Image (cartoon, rainbow, N blue to C red):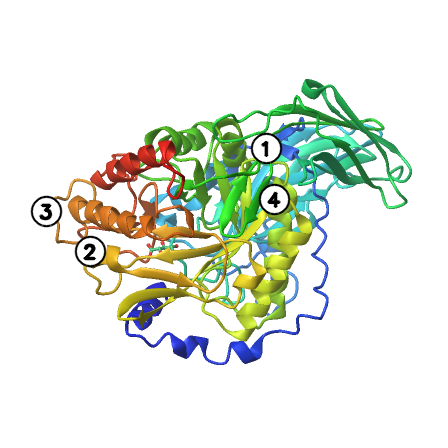
Amino acid sequence: MAWLYRLLIWLGVSSLFVTGVASARPDESAPPPPPPRVHPVLVSADMRPSLDLSGPWHMSIDPYRDGVAGFHGGDPGLSSRRYADIDIATTEKRDGNALFEQDPARSPIVTLPSSWLTQSPEMRHYVGLVWYQRHFTAHKRPGKRVFLRFGAANYAAHVYLNGKHVGEHRGGFTPFAFDVTKLLHDGDNQITVGVDSQRTDQDIPPPVTDWETYGGITRAITLIAVPDTYIDDAWIRLTHDGHIRASGRLDGPAAANMPVRVTIAGLGLTLDARTDAHGDWQAAVPAPASLKRWSPDSPTLYDVAVKAGDDTLHDRIGFRTVSVDGDRILLNGKPIFLRGISLHAEEFGVDPSHVITPEAARALLEEAKYGLHANYVRLAHYPHPEVMLRTADKMGLLVWSEIPVYWRVDFSNPDTLSQARQMLAENITRDRNRASIMLWSVGNETPVSPARNRFLQTLAADAHRLDDTRLVSAALLSHREKRNGVDTVVIDDPLIPSLDVMAINTYNGWYGNDSLASLPSIAWASKYHKPLIFSELGAGAKAGVHDSTGTHKFSEEYQAEYYRQTLAMAAKIPFLRGMSPWILKDFRSPRRQHPVYQQGWNRKGLESETGVRKEAFFVLARQYARWAKQPPGSPK
Ligand code: GCB
């Protein structure tokens, strides 16, 4: 789709897509609907003590979804219920007449979290339903509530505990949790999860993307016990008026009118609050002069403790402000140029499984920070696991975070909008305490139409309302025209008034017919006085393929030259405030099947999938080293 759109742009017919937009602007006087409420949030869940259910699980495929419904509809027959709390082997022994057509307890064992694509060669391209099952021991404790939490399951999850339905979740990249206090047994428990990776045209993202979407349970599964009344949400941040503000919500029978205390020991600060009738609380104090603001050069984090009743929550939080001033981006009040790189949540290696351990996160982010001299990463194209954000917080990398509103979304479908809003709310409530995140992005390369504009405007409004301390952006499309005889890329997406930062993915010189030498003479224009980021730019190369003439695509030389010329173009754009070239390393993409160069990988990485640096890596690293000393646009 993206290539088709780019081709049309190049042919000069992009106006087809834009026709009628101006007259179709939504009614701006109508108040935007409030964002959906996420419940439970279980904020900072990764910092709470928990029972980790990672490890061996049984796995049973169910391509015809027999375990979800009978062949005439309705409930599945007893012989097909993967989640039933029955010892099938014993039942069969006892009763020769018993009929079962599955038995997870005797099915193959795999290790979770990980995507099933790498669990056996037959599963490489499996899209559909898979059941996972295991047993674990838990002890019931009076006065405690127990949540079963999933870091993410891609795409839809059906969860059962001890044969009983617990809940469902749609959306492959955000966390969800269920209160299982009543269903939990004291002693042995059986958990079964059906994960369905089949997405429809109404889902986010829709079925066609340019990355491997990795079906399965790819993030931690934990059992978290909290007091009956517990701190469900706590957001502690530095606001633009120079205060440290804390707000959140208690959940449980004693949530109303309860004192809450936030302590930041390193600053000698205590914030006291009392909840209202709903359990909501807030407090603020002027930031002390001793506060060391978080930045990429000095990523200071403070221990923060939140206490309410019997519950105490710990976190490590950095404090900084991000804002825009005209077409500049400010970090802690000072202009910053974002030297970035894009990343998928895909670990280095010959057969990645979309499992980001702390070591895998470090390996990726260290290449960005210390290899490329980056101060910023675009975590594409969906919310990355918490460990990526924690690592960015610690290492000092600013982050663009996004939800997968990508390409051909069903923008006029209210259910699709609800899913996207839910995802955005889950992402923001999970991550609002991460100093590294500076930008929420609500869409990637979505063709302009009245329905799309309304959809993304709603998401942008949600992002602003859920978090008034960060910037909102989207990777937009642009079009080409001649202005005074000069080839000009015009940025005039009608979504821009709803955004703080404009972002464009540019591939001139890779897609389309521009010669590399012509790139620096392309001009960029926008009637909007806002900062611009190149959210992508890139060209493919297979590591080790060389062409001394530099004229052939997929050679390292072509990619390197593409970078030289595109950087020369970028340096001339006065309102360009950063970039996140596409992409740090080659990543799996089922739509890339050139047998010589791609073999199922998108080759736009500056490194191969195993981390071999290509020539273009060094071109960008050298430029970033220069920009680190002398950012573009700064006084000489
Ligand atoms: C894009 C997409 C990204 C693709 C990339 C490409 O614009 O946002 O997901 O992988 O182009 O390689 O074409």
The alpha-carbon separation of the residues under discs 3 and 2 comes to 15 Å
Confirm or deny contact between disc 1 and disc 4 (CB under 8 A): no
Task: Please report whichever mark, 4 or 2, sits nearer to the chain's N-terminal start.
Answer: 4
Circle 4 residues within 10 Å: few <14, some 14–19, many ≥20: many
Kindly indicate the quadrant of the structure image that contains residue 520.
bottom left
Residue 389 x/y as whole percent = 53, 36
Confirm or deny contact between disc 2 and disc 1 (CB under 8 A): no
In the image, 349: left or right of 68?
Answer: left
- Residue 224 shows in this picture: yes
* Residue to which mark 3 is pinned: 547
Residue 628 x/y as whole percent = 37, 33
* Residue to which mark 1 is pinned: 53
Look at the image and tell me in which quarter the C terminus lies.
Answer: top left
The alpha-carbon separation of the residues under discs 3 and 4 comes to 46 Å
Which one is in front, 386 or 6?
6
Q: Is mark 4 within 8 Å of ligand 1?
A: no
* Residue to which mark 2 is pinned: 516
Residue visible at 69% across and 21% down in the picture: 267
Task: Please report whichever mark, 3 or 2, sits nearer to the chain's N-terminal start.
Answer: 2
